[in-house]
Image (cartoon, coloured by chain):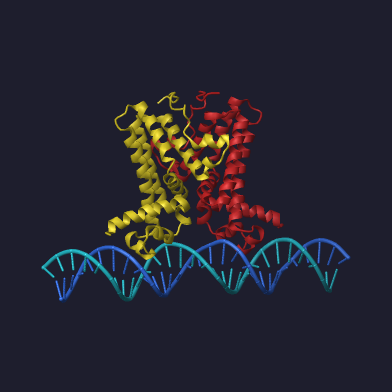
Chain colours: A yellow, B red, C cyan, D blue
Amino acid sequence: MTADERRQEILKAAVAEFALGGLEGTSTEDIARRAGISQPYLFRLYPTKKALFIASMEAAFGRITTALEDSARGLDDERALEAMADTYTALLQDRELLLVQLHSYAACGDPDIRVAARRCFRKLWSTISGVAGIGGERLTMFVAVGMLLNVAAALELDEVDQEWAQLCSKVPPSWLENGDGPD
Amino acid sequence: MTADERRQEILKAAVAEFALGGLEGTSTEDIARRAGISQPYLFRLYPTKKALFIASMEAAFGRITTALEDSARGLDDERALEAMADTYTALLQDRELLLVQLHSYAACGDPDIRVAARRCFRKLWSTISGVAGIGGERLTMFVAVGMLLNVAAALELDEVDQEWAQLCSKVPPSWLENGDGPD
DNA sequence: GCTCGAAGTTAGTGGTGACTCACTATCTTG
DNA sequence: CAAGATAGTGAGTCACCACTAACTTCGAGC
């Protein structure tokens, strides 16, 4: 297998493991095992654990951003927003992406990671804004709901059979319809 | 100093340190140093690091919940919601509480912590609901904005001098006024 | 003034984890 | 086929860290 292919495998494994444990809670050993290689070889292909974490962040954010973009391409603004909400709901099934996002925010105590996380977040933000042609408070609210869904994923609220828990774990169905912000 | 007083000191130090590094990113040595005691003595007063983390979570969530409750006590529903929004904005100054919250969610890979985090979150949720007399989607949106503010605190977006960053770091001024949800 | 318990410390210990070094195996190319 | 590059590993290093054991200090009560 070529180094580049192997790097992809590692990245896939890293996203999965970092989703579970975050930067500090995941060992490079865990990642290597999942990727099916020895732990030292991981360091041949990624210089440091932190670099691998940042790569994982970028992969996870990238997949989310791309999925949203794709689902809304060619639709008019109002339908684009609905489409993105649907897509995000679909992403909920694969908790990996949401959890990596959450762990990225949590790891922002480190300046390098903070810079990378800002870049990823900004990209996500501007993609949504551009594709749906919205801005201002309506955009803020859209992203806010996304953040709540991340928390719901972390808490595994879908396992909790109570009304409030169900409310948190899915996009509110009606809030899209009425344009509540001025924008 | 009595053991109970010391426990309070440790808890204060723990909240501060865990806010910076989270469960895995903070050493008990760091906490002990900040509390001004030797590291082994910490284990006389808290059985494990995890127990101390859970205590820190509960302290942080408790302070938030209490602050919201206090600020809204005696007001009618609509004013209560505004008051709580103001209070949360004020809490933004002290990023400690928001960050401990975020790290609590991130540490939910551990079942014990997940259970504790759900309990804290549920309490926060039901307090807001009870005090403001709201429910359904309007409540969801209120909490969602709170989650976005947590992320903004982690990313230190107030340091970023760009429009989108400013949008994230404060409660949208107008969304309170119009009852956008049903009920 | 002596004892007893509670506050607190110093010096470990066993384990883990990021990262390195020296090595092997395989493949390609002149 | 010789030789260099490329994929990959086993064994180790060094620092850190959660937690323990054994000791000291000191104030209160008899």
Q: Quadrant of residue A67?
A: top left
Q: Is residue B74 left or right of residue A75?
A: right
Give percent across and percent down for residue A6.
31, 57
Which of the pair B17/A145 is nearer the observer? Answer: A145
Q: Position of residue B38 (x, y in %)?
A: 61, 63
Q: Position of residue A57 (x, y in %)?
A: 39, 49
Q: Residue at x 49, y 33 (%)?
A: B171
Q: Say which residue appears at 29% left-offset and 56% top-offset.
A: A5
Q: Is residue B127 above or below residue A95?
A: above
Identify which residue is drawn at 37% across, 65% down.
A40
Quadrant of res A129: top left
Point out residue A98 in the picture as x, y percentages from the top left corner: 44, 44
Identify which residue, D11 or B159, lies in the foreground. D11
Q: Quick one: A177 or B6, which is closer to the camera?
A: A177
Q: Is residue B41 above or below residue A141?
A: below
Q: As drawn, is A178 to the left or to the right of A155? A: left
- Quarter occupied by the N terminus of chain A: bottom left
Quarter of the image holding residue A69?
top left
> Quick check: A57 left or right of B59?
left
User: Total of numbered circles in the picture?
Assistant: 0
Q: Quadrant of the C terminus of chain A?
A: top left
- Give the answer, above or below, for where A78 lies relative to B87: above
